Image (cartoon, rainbow, N blue to C red):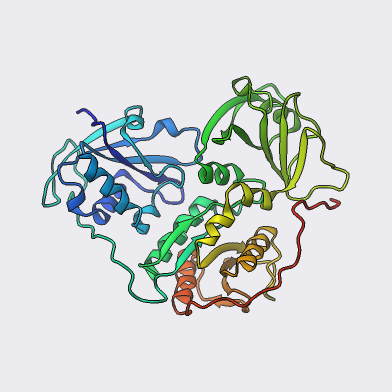
Amino acid sequence: MEYSKFSLGLRFAMTSDERLTPQDCWRIAFSEIPATHVAVATLFGAWDDVGAAESEGAYICMFSNLPRKVGKALFAQLQQKPVLLSYLTIYHPFIQNNRVEKCSDVVYLGQAQADGSVTGGDVAYAPMQFSGSLPEPCDKLGQCCRILIAPDAWDGMFTSADAARHMLRSASKMLPKAILRTQLIADGGKGTLDALICSNNGRYLKAAIANASGESRDIQYGILPNRTVVIESESLAKEELQQALRLPQNKGFTEYIVAAGAGVLPEDVPAGIHATVLGKRIPASRRNSVQIEYRNGVEAVLETCAFNDALAKADWLIALTRLQDETGSLNDPTTDALLFHCRLQRKHAAVLAFTDDGRYFAKLDDHKLVPIDTTSFDEAADALFLIIKNTPISPPPLFLPVVRQDTVISDM
């Protein structure tokens, strides 16, 4: 079978967290997409091998041979399907056929009919019947709020993308008519690459470097549209970072963002390169030079991701944090930065906090922590959005934010 010039692919995230199968992907697609938007479409499924440099693997549900107007209408409708979006990759959730042609294990599922059924394929995934509905307009105050979901990654518990997808699913369940948007957040360490690439529509790349023993291993990095190279160096040794800064395929790129986090901070960079180093704690002895600028990781990520622009279009910000204590104090630099920007723009903020022993709490604006009686992340997220649903939308109180420095210098 040939792919048409206009085809639309849905990239389902195949992570250890979701454990989806191709049949699961098509079941979700069949239940969410209206039959009226896919009649005459030819269906294919494929594994996205060309995305190997990305942090998330993907399975593609492909709709080919669509008339251009029908394809554009389908794409517009899918943007308003938060349940469907909550299963797709954060990076490039939709693609066109020129990428699918490079994928492996492409299977033909058949032709979509006017009644929503699918016939004539080589593979059948029950029920093979499109039964989705069109998005309904919002007509109830309090359920039409605009929500920005911006969770940070927590090592050993959540990636930022996984947390965003789960919270998006909960929000669409409790507030089906809300306008939902996700934003990956990071503190300048692990997760920074994903946050910057996804927010700026950059490119993931892989390269081989040698460790101290001379053994070769692959590292993942990225390039932003403005030709800035992004490297996560928290897990790299000093010698490995120097190799990453000198990759021959990046010759001619002069701007680098080094997400050092709590790892090794570079003391020098190759000639002709300017590096912005993002750290969690920068010692007072580290001063900016002509070639190296040390910056607070959280604020630099928010700035590069245009976070304030996204926040300006929201009524609520949703954050995720590990709870330091049960007094209501969220002593986390990332959460502190997010709440600071909420106060500047007078936006509502809701934080889902968790403890190391599996307990969950909700916190809205400056109210006290409210315990959530569950040990399930999905149920805790449901409870948080239920609280928001029952909270009338009103201007939050005018806070007097504390003046903060963009670059945090402290002794380690």
Left or right of 307, for residue 51: left
Q: Position of residue 35 (x, y in %)?
A: 18, 52
In which quarter of the view is residue 92 placed? top left
Q: Residue at x 25, y 43 (%)?
A: 71
Q: Position of residue 407 (x, y in %)?
A: 77, 51
Name the one closer to the observer, 190 or 245: 245
Left or right of 211, for residue 177: left
Q: Residue at x 39, y 73 (%)?
A: 143
Left or right of 297, for residue 310: left
Q: Position of residue 179 (x, y in %)?
A: 41, 63
Q: Residue at x 56, y 36 (%)?
A: 224
Q: Position of residue 114 (x, y in %)?
A: 11, 49
Name the one closer to the observer, 141 or 43: 141
Classify the position of the N terminus by image quarter: top left
Q: Residue furthest right?
A: 285
| Above/below status of 220 relative to 402 | above
In which quarter of the view is residue 152 placed? bottom right
Name the one closer to the observer, 239 or 180: 180
Q: Residue at x 55, y 29 (%)?
A: 206
**Quick check: can you spot residue 169?**
yes
Left or right of 232, for residue 406: right
